[in-house]
Image (spheres, rainbow, N blue to C red):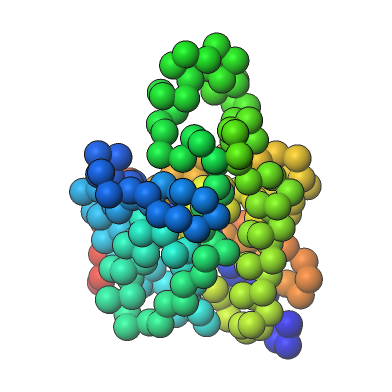
Amino acid sequence: MTGNDTRLLFLIRHGRSDFDSTDTMRTARGVQWDPPLGSEGREQAELLGRRLALMPPPAAVYCSTLRRARETVEPYAARTGCDVTYLEELAEAFIGSWEGMSFEEIVRTDAEMLHLFRNQEAMWRRAPGAEPLPELQERATTAIESILRRHPDGNVFVMAHGGIINAYIGPVLGLHEREMFFLPDNTSINSVVVEGDRRSVRFLSDIRHLNEPHFFEPGA
């Protein structure tokens, strides 16, 4: 880092996916779920874009290559004309044979999975063929820290996924063995203070643009 000022890393989750879409799979680290946004997700993305446009322009905007993330960043990019860099390394965790399955499908006939779901225990590592947690954390941390080094001054926006956000923030909080310690809401803004090599969490799962959108109207 060449500058001395404290700056912010904003990790933003995509909008709500279209769970009824039939065109939902792609091949990358394996056959992976890649749905578009649903109607609710598109509305969330519009409200998010309006809010982000009121914030100081970032030094850079990065985004996952998955459709739900790309479609979430589009309203903001259209409003501001900013450049967006898309990185495969920011794509969601790969969960093997569970890709494309809902929680209901996973836990319906498995009492152990239902117990984990009810008791705030993460389940991904139990999925056959899933990306191991250490590899996910390494992927997320390497990608995001590379972005910060590439842009040593100013704030940075990263549009990604719940798994990626957990994988990066967990170790910042000393939670190295927790694959999911919180569930970021759709289009939630999660911020990390960046000061030299030091990282500290500032705010998690902020969705005020959804709950109180009038505060983010231009001229309000």
| Residue 106 position (above or below residue 187) | above
All told, the count of numbered labels is 0
Q: In this view, does 202 lie to the left or right of 20?
A: right
User: Residue at the spot x=70%, y=52% of the render?
Assistant: 135
Q: Residue at x 41, y 33 (%)?
A: 101
Q: Nearer the viewer, residue 127 or 137?
A: 127
Q: In the picture shown, does residue 40 fall above or below 65?
A: above
Residue at the spot 40% in from the left edge and 54% down from the top edge: 26
Residue drawn 63% across the image and 67% down it: 144
**Split into 4 quadrants, where in the image is the N terminus?**
bottom right
Q: Quadrant of residue 57?
A: bottom left
Does residue 48 show up?
no
On the picture, is 22 further left or further right than 96? left
User: What percent of the width, then of the height, locates residue 3?
Assistant: 70, 86
Query: Going by the picture, which residue comes out furthest to the left?
Result: 39
Can residue 199 be seen from the camera position used here?
A: yes
Give the percent coordinates (x, y) of residue 6.
67, 75
Q: Is residue 87 above or below residue 24?
A: below
Q: Along the line of sight, which residue is nearer the eye, 170 or 65? A: 65
Please state, as top left, top right, bottom left or bottom right, where the C terminus lies in the image: bottom left
Q: In this view, does 56 lie above or below 65?
A: below
Of all residues, the one furthest to the bottom in this rendering is: 2
In the rendering, at what x and y percent does residue 139 appear?
66, 60
Q: Give the x, y percent position of residue 147.
A: 61, 75
